[in-house]
Amino acid sequence: MTLPILWSFRRCPYAMRARLAISVSGMQVQLREIVLRSKPDAFLVTSPSATVPCLKFDKGVIDESFDIMLWALGQNDPEAWLDMADQGHSLIETSDGPFKTSLDRYKYASRHPDGDALVERAKAAEFLTNLNLMLDGQAWLFGGNPTLADMAILPFVRQFAHVDLDWFLQQPWPHLITWLNAFKSSPRFLGIMSKYTPWTEDDEPVIFPPTTTD
């Protein structure tokens, strides 16, 4: 059977969370790394939005990262990421909505000359302050184990932190910073951040996650 094709870009937080869910699910895909400034025609034909990640499989195309997460975990969810409190979905909606909007206007301030990067940073910080409170006394947002909310949100917290890491580390968010550092050093995250050369039609399929042998 032909494996699904995942169009991806290594540093994109949306693509990161899709790869995280695929990795934990035990599913395998053909990974096709692209360069965003030079998108291949085969990708543009596949993705309705022309954005990564995009998953093509025998039943069609999934063009949203969160839907790819749900698809992968729907196949297999060995770490019970889907077993989370209802609040988790609200947190993801806030992360994908107001927080990501402020993050973009902070990180890419030159693209938003009508805005104020520091105001947007302060707006985003309100969400992070709430997460820090939730993480007080526990390793993950809903207890001792990660859930979908953690893995859907962490790539964007990482992106926010690295806009100005010195400033971020000075904030009164000890639990949030510990949470992020644990994620960044985890085998799961490191395993989805391997570097791949951009895909061309002549390449052999790249299997993700790689098949391991003893």
Image (cartoon, rainbow, N blue to C red):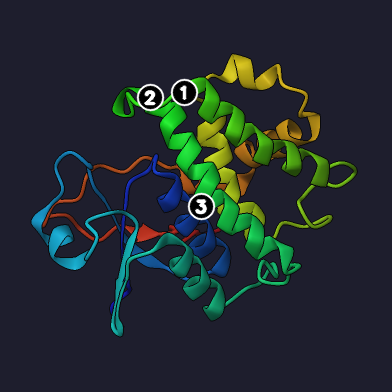
CB of mark 1 within 8 Å of CB of mark 3? Answer: no
Q: Label 1 neighbourhood size at 10 Å, few (<14), some (14-19), many (20+)?
A: many
Point out the tag, 2 or 3, that comes first from the N-terminus: 3
Q: Quadrant of the C terminus?
A: bottom right
CB of mark 2 within 8 Å of CB of mark 1? Answer: yes
| Residue identifier under label 1 | 117
Q: Amino acid at mark 1?
A: Ala
Q: Residue lying farthest right?
A: 137
Q: At x 61% / y 14%, what residue is drawn?
A: 166
Q: Quadrant of the N terminus?
A: bottom left
Q: Is residue 190 visible?
A: no
Percent from the top left, x then y, of residue 192? 48, 48
Q: Is residue 136 visible?
A: yes
Q: At x 72% / y 69%, what residue is drawn?
A: 86
Q: Label 3 neighbourhood size at 10 Å, few (<14), some (14-19), many (20+)?
A: some
Label 2 secondary element: helix
Point out the tag, 2 or 1, that comes first from the N-terminus: 2
Percent from the top left, x then y, of residue 196? 31, 43
Disc assigned to residue 96: 3
Percent from the top left, x then y, of residue 111? 30, 28
